[in-house]
Image: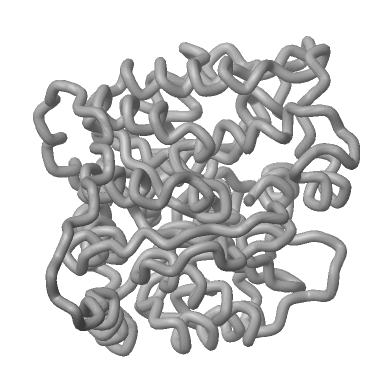
Amino acid sequence: MRTGLLLGVSCLLACASHAPPPPAPPARSPTPVAEPAPASVTSDAGPPADPSKEVRAEADGWRAAHRLVDLHTHIDPAPEHVAQALRVFDAAGIGVAVELSGGTTTHAKGQPSEFEQVKASLDAHAPGRFLEYMNLDYTRWDDADFAQQAVAQVEEGARLGAAGFKEFKRLGLYLRDKKGALLKIDDPKLDPMWRRLGELGMPVSIHVADPKAFWAPYDAKNERWTELKDHPRWWFGDPKKFPPHAELLGALERVIARHPETTFVCVHFGNDAEELEWVDAQLDAHPNMLIDVAARVPEFGRHDPEKVHAFFVKHADRILFATDFQVYDRMTLGSGGSGPPPTEGDALGFYATHWRFFETADRDFPHMTPIQGDWTISAIHLPADVLRKVYFENAEHLLAKPLARLRTHE
């Protein structure tokens, strides 16, 4: 079902509403992430109440009602893989998942596109449970009219029911033109497409960079060595082949700034989970920028938990729950390697560790994706009003029209 050059690239690199989106909030003066307040002194001799118990009880209610939206998944549309994903989602409390590997809208004459095939299968085998994003076919990049072709592709995606658009970490890192030059994230040839996506009300989930360790020396001293040795194509430390990490982020920022009417969901915690201050500044500077947390809790979870808590409270309207959960011939829980394939029980533990991180004040516990690094994380005890936004309300706002259509067909 999933054929063609683009699919091969998208599966390898996977871990982006027809009406215009609501107006972006007005720009505001940048405000730094607040420093944690000092603990108050109390004369009460009894143990303090644990506010996380009340929060967890409320969140358990949302999960029981399947309110949560996972904005970042990759699920093969084969019936057996869809069925496995649904078993995990049902048990974890995920009501709707966004399929970011929806495929391209180009097709041979008389044949359905990859996107049509994926959407038809997910709609048939999991009605009311998936929204599908489309992907761009770059095959004819060198054509003089590729800018117009790209616009036509996303217009066709909108016609076919694509809820949004996903760009994998291909631009700036993998895709090359016929002369061998890397395609740039901020290439002006793509500007008409980014603009049209905004006009169509299709949010863009965009992946441009990975942890800085992927640019560090490729050896056993690298803190992500366990992951990199199983994924050598994720190593970008050769300056003769790849641009610096900062250059990719700079190109992303220029695209977001050039297209203020288009909503960009910068995946993997803004593509820079190690730099809380940089992500904070970007959110302050660009009202059309949102972030998801997919596959990066292990990274930003080792920051000072009170600073991360303050970041989430400050940007509560701009952060979306997401995991990078994948189901193909084996499941992937944020990332994976050559070890034994995860079980469905492992997948539920993966989601449960997210709940522990966001809802409790626990300290120094193992994170949910061990292959990503040998360290612990500390939880950020978010209040219920922030959790509601992160877990589902922000996604309901971002994807209001496609979700409304989806729920009329449940």
Q: From the image, which quarter does the C terminus lie in? A: bottom left
Residue under the image location 48 percent in, 32 percent down: 275
Residue under the image location 57 percent in, 18 percent down: 246
- Give how far across and how far down residue 48 sits, in percent: 22, 76
Residue under the image location 12 percent in, 25 percent down: 28
In this rendered view, identify the residue nearer to me: 332 or 8. Answer: 332
Whether residue 247 sits left or right of residue 266 in the image: it is right
Whether residue 252 sits left or right of residue 261 in the image: it is right
Q: How is the image coloured?
A: one colour
- Give how far across and how far down residue 129 sits, in percent: 40, 76
Instruction: Check the image and report above or below for 55 versus 104.
Output: below
- Give how far across and how far down residue 109 sits, in percent: 61, 48
Instruction: Check the image and report above or below for 301 versus 242.
Output: below
- Give how far across and how far down residue 253 sits, in percent: 41, 20
In this rendered view, identify the residue nearer to me: 27 or 140. Answer: 27
Residue 287 location, quadrant: top left
Instruction: Check the image and report above or below for 63 versus 135.
Output: below
